[in-house]
Image (spheres, rainbow, N blue to C red):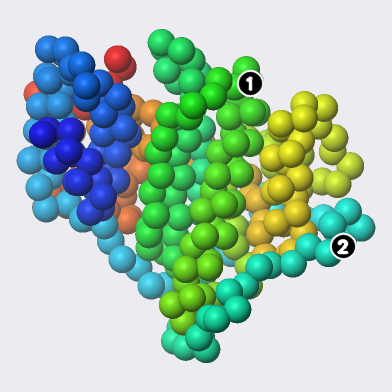
Amino acid sequence: MLAGSLNWTVTIGRIDVMFAAVTMLRYNHAPHKGHFKTMFRIFGYLKYHIKASLKMNTSYPEEPVEGIVRANWKHLYPGAHEKLPHNAPEPKGKPLRVWGEFDADHAHDHENRRYVSGILIYMNNSVVKWYSKRQNTIETSTYGSELVSYRTIVELLIKMGYCVRILGGPLLCKSWLYGNNQAVILNCSRPESILKKKHHSCTCHFIRETSSIGWLFLVKQSSLKSKSDILTKALNPSKLCEKLKGWMVSNCNMTYPLRRNVKIILEI
């Protein structure tokens, strides 16, 4: 019952407890006493911020001026094109900018060293999609976990763009993806870069082919600025409040440290 209520809370917009919910739902079938205590702490945090909600902002995001790596892919993918819905209505209204942030916590799980992917997708400056998942595979390197997370957010962006067009919404022609792994950005943005591992190479070519269409760009971003960190790791209250500042509003001062009995501690 507690796990179902927490899952529904995340669905209606409480992104700040999504990582906690994903972690605790793993023990839904055979919980221990410590899991119940942690769940009560999470609900204590929700009670303390009972009126917190997402902030909707329809203004356009600023275009990145640094960190973009551009390349000409036409010689590698000459027939690449964006798949548009054939029965989409005529677009009307204000054009939307769809962009996103992604992150991965390599070897997060202490039991089997599986990693966690965290993704945030925005329309203009409003968060419309949040994704946090402990993956089913084990990657032996940080590069592999970041690359798979990149592929996942590209697939979600394609899906989001298709949904917007089928509903009659206009989209701007460029989208940015912010990541903090320099190796992934260079491999997926430069034609001369070569990967030897077959499964990584297939993922990389899927991303490159999507980028060759001309609407997707990968941008290097500092880990300190990445808001997707809240979906991949347990943060202390001060860092969590700093990440949420600007796009989540609360009934109290978010910079005020949480009381000791409502801190979320999920190092399980």
The location of residue 258, given as percent across then percent down, is 15, 32
Between disc 1 and disc 2, the foreground one is: 2
Q: Amino acid at mark 2?
A: Pro
Disc 1 target residue: 141
Disc 2 target residue: 78
Which image quarter: residue 42? top left
Q: Is residue 127 left or right of residue 28?
A: right
Does label 1 or label 2 sit earlier along the sequence? 2
Tell me if residue 101 can be seen. Answer: yes
Q: Is residue 17 left or right of residue 99?
A: left
- Numbered disc 1: secondary structure: loop
Name the residue located 55 percent from the left edge and 44 percent from the top edge.
152
The location of residue 203, given as percent across then percent down, is 69, 40
Q: Is residue 177 left or right of residue 232?
A: right
- Numbered disc 2: secondary structure: loop
Q: Is residue 115 left or right of residue 150?
A: left
In this view, 88 is above or below 227: below
In this view, 137 is above or below 173: above
Tell me if residue 20 can be seen. Answer: no
In this view, 198 is above or below 6: above
